[in-house]
Image (cartoon, helix red, strand yellow):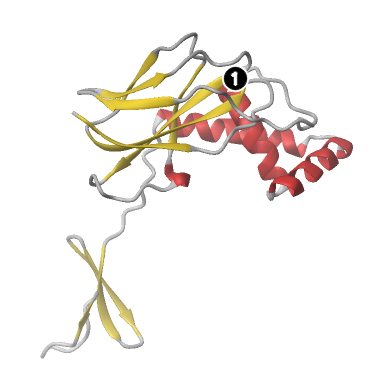
């Protein structure tokens, strides 16, 4: 950030020039990079927002007794009751748009599956390979995160779901993705409750 002083004609610059923004502050005029809000409204983003909106409305309409069950569950997992409900119901809606509203959280923990996954980059995307079939009622959530460079850090909260797959055997699934370096991960999800395991990171691959 640079600081500008008044020229011989007096006054200070303000406004935008190209990719620079001149801002008057108590210490003079400073130059900042122009920040353009990033909200491309992709189909995936619109679908996510629609699911979360449906989940939020469902939470608002929950019977108080059902809300109390979710509050107790949320306390155990360190989340706010509404966030716990909408997170799990949002996953169920992703798996099935007609998923019924979960009136109560599962009383049982979810431990995932015994299979594991690996990845490889291709010219058009990323291939996930499973070491075996998923257990009944369990699906593998495939997650990717674009990186600016090979050694750029990946953040767990920035992985984005690409697909939910019930692997029928030791097989693979190709996921289309733009060229570049990509961080890969997966986790297991219960198809009946929306519960999920922690994200398992698989490293970085090159697409293209």
Q: Residue at x 43, y 44 (%)?
A: 158
| In the depicted structure, whether residue 88 falls above or below residue 99 | below
The one of 31 and 17 positioned closer to us in this rendering: 31
Q: Residue at x 51, y 33 (%)?
A: 48
Give the residue at mark 1. 138
Q: Quadrant of the N terminus?
A: bottom left
Q: Is residue 183 left or right of residue 30?
A: right
Q: Is residue 57 left or right of residue 37?
A: right
Q: Answer yes or no: is residue 96 visible.
A: no
The one of 111 and 8 positioned closer to us in this rendering: 111
Outermost residue toward the left in this view: 8
Q: Is residue 88 left or right of residue 30?
A: right
| Rendered location of residue 53, percent (x, y) | 61, 35
| In the depicted structure, whether residue 195 falls above or below residue 98 | below
Q: Quadrant of residue 113?
A: top right
Q: Quadrant of the C terminus?
A: top left
Outermost residue toward the top in this view: 168
| Rendered location of residue 28, percent (x, y) | 28, 86
Q: Answer yes or no: is residue 66 visible.
A: yes
Count of numbered circles on the image: 1
Q: Is residue 134 left or right of residue 73?
A: left
| Rendered location of residue 4, percent (x, y) | 19, 82
Q: Quadrant of residue 109?
A: top right
Q: Please rate how many residues cluster around mark 1, counting C-alpha atoms within 10 Å: few if below 14, some from 14 to 19, many from 20.
A: many
Outermost residue toward the right in this view: 65
| Rendered location of residue 161, percent (x, y) | 46, 31
Query: In the structure shown, which secondary structural element does the residue marked by tag 1 occupy?
Result: strand
Q: Residue at x 79, y 45 (%)?
A: 71
Q: Residue at x 43, y 36 (%)?
A: 160
| In the depicted structure, whether residue 63 falls above or below residue 93 | below
């Amino acid at each position: 950030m640079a600081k500008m002083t008044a020229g011989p004609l007096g006054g200070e610059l303000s406004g935008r020039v190209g990719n620079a923004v001149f801002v008057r502050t108590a210490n003079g005029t400073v130059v900042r990079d122009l920040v353009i809000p990033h909200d491309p409204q992709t189909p995936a983003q619109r679908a996510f927002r629609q699911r979360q909106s449906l989940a939020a409305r469902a939470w608002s309409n929950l019977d108080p007794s059902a809300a109390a069950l979710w509050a107790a569950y949320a306390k155990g997992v360190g989340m706010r009751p509404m966030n716990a409900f909408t997170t799990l119901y949002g996953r169920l809606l992703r798996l099935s748009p007609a998923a019924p509203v979960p009136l109560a959280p599962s009383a049982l923990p979810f431990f995932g599956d015994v299979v594991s996954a690996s990845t490889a980059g291709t010219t058009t995307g990323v291939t996930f390979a499973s070491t075996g079939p998923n257990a009944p009622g369990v699906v593998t959530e495939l997650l990717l995160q674009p990186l600016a460079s090979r050694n750029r850090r990946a953040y767990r909260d920035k992985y984005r779901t690409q697909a939910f797959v019930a692997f029928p055997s030791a097989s693979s699934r190709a996921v289309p993705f733009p060229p570049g370096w990509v961080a890969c991960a997966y986790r297991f999800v219960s198809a009946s409750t929306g519960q999920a395991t922690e994200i398992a990171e698989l490293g970085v691959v090159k697409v293209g």
